[in-house]
Image (cartoon, rainbow, N blue to C red):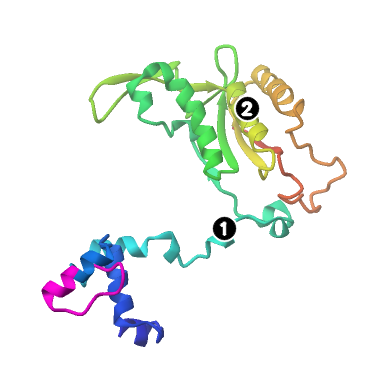
Amino acid sequence: RFFTNKQNENDMSIDDVHDLFYQLNGHRLSKELEDTMSLVSGMKSAPHGVSWEKEYITWEVFTKYLMLESNDVFDPDRAKPSSCVMTEPLNNYWINTSHDTYLHRTKETFQDPKIAEKTDLQSYTLALYHGARAIELDVWDGQKDPVVRHGETDFPDNTIIDSTTKKSARSVSSLKFSDVLQTIAYFLQSEPKSFPIILLIENHCSLPFQEIMAKNIEFILEKRGFLYRPDPNLTPTSALPSPADLVGKVLIKSKRAT
């Protein structure tokens, strides 16, 4: 009744419903075994590949069925970017943004402190491969180089407690700004057709460290052709370039924290 009255699928039969239930319950029997079960039970033979064991599905199975990608109300093909729909000005798009990216650590950080920094840098790569195209960076004065970290701290490292093992582990509380830029550059080298990556820099650095930041950006991004420099003839009313125009580029959006 649900299929015919609610879904208006008049071509569905009860056998189709049973077949779906059997598939969802994971029962797919051979034709020989079906025939044997039919003979013993006195029932007519079930449709090929269908078990007689269950003619219903549990709430859990039904929920999982609804969550399948094939049942998504959104057409998955619409999620695939196309060059024909990426020619509008950049500000016309919603952009997948990653905040405090390097804090998204994996369990290996707790288990092996030696790979903590590597794991943290990999968080940027993972964010990019997961679709993020705007990366937030809080940049502060370091001992010798500008560093990316979450908030201001007087300590170079933090000790955190793994809630599972109750053991302390050394965790890198800051990353070199230049290392983060290198990680992004490596991603663009492997994915040259990537839509533009926007670095949302919140600059807490003093003037000497800002100069180092500028040199890092020039050396790591500009010399490799990744840095986007706006047309000097652009005015505040000019349209921004489109994602299609900025493929393989890094855009810098920075503000000096007060």
Location of residue 155 by image quarter:
top left
Residue under the image location 71 percent in, 49 percent down: 243
Residue drawn at x 27%, y 60% as measured from the top left: 26
User: Hey, what amino acid is under mark 1?
Assistant: Ala
Question: What kind of element bears circle 1?
Answer: helix
Q: What residue type is labelled 2?
A: Leu
Q: In this view, does 51 lie above or below 254?
A: below
User: What residue is rendered at 50% in x and 39% in y?
Assistant: 99
Q: Which residue lies furthest to the right in this view?
A: 233
Task: Assign the N terminus to one quadrant of the image.
Answer: bottom left
As drawn, the label of residue 79 is: 1
Residue 16 in picture, x, y percent from top left: 33, 77
Q: Residue 110, how many percent across, how many down?
A: 34, 24
Where the C terminus falls, by quadrant?
A: top right
Q: Which of 127 and 202 is in front in this view?
A: 127
Q: Which mark, residue 181?
A: 2
Q: In this view, does 124 lie to the left or right of 112?
A: right
User: Viewer-proximal residue, 45 or 209?
Assistant: 45
x, y percent for residue 125: 54, 34
Residue 41 seen anywhere in this rendered image of the structure: yes
Residue 99 falls left or right of residue 177: left
- Counting every numbered tag in the picture gives 2
Q: Magenta part of the protein: which range?
A: 36-52
The one of 65 and 146 positioned closer to us in this rendering = 65
Viewer-side label of 2, 1:
1
Apparent side of residue 4 relative to residue 141 in the rendered image (left or right)? left
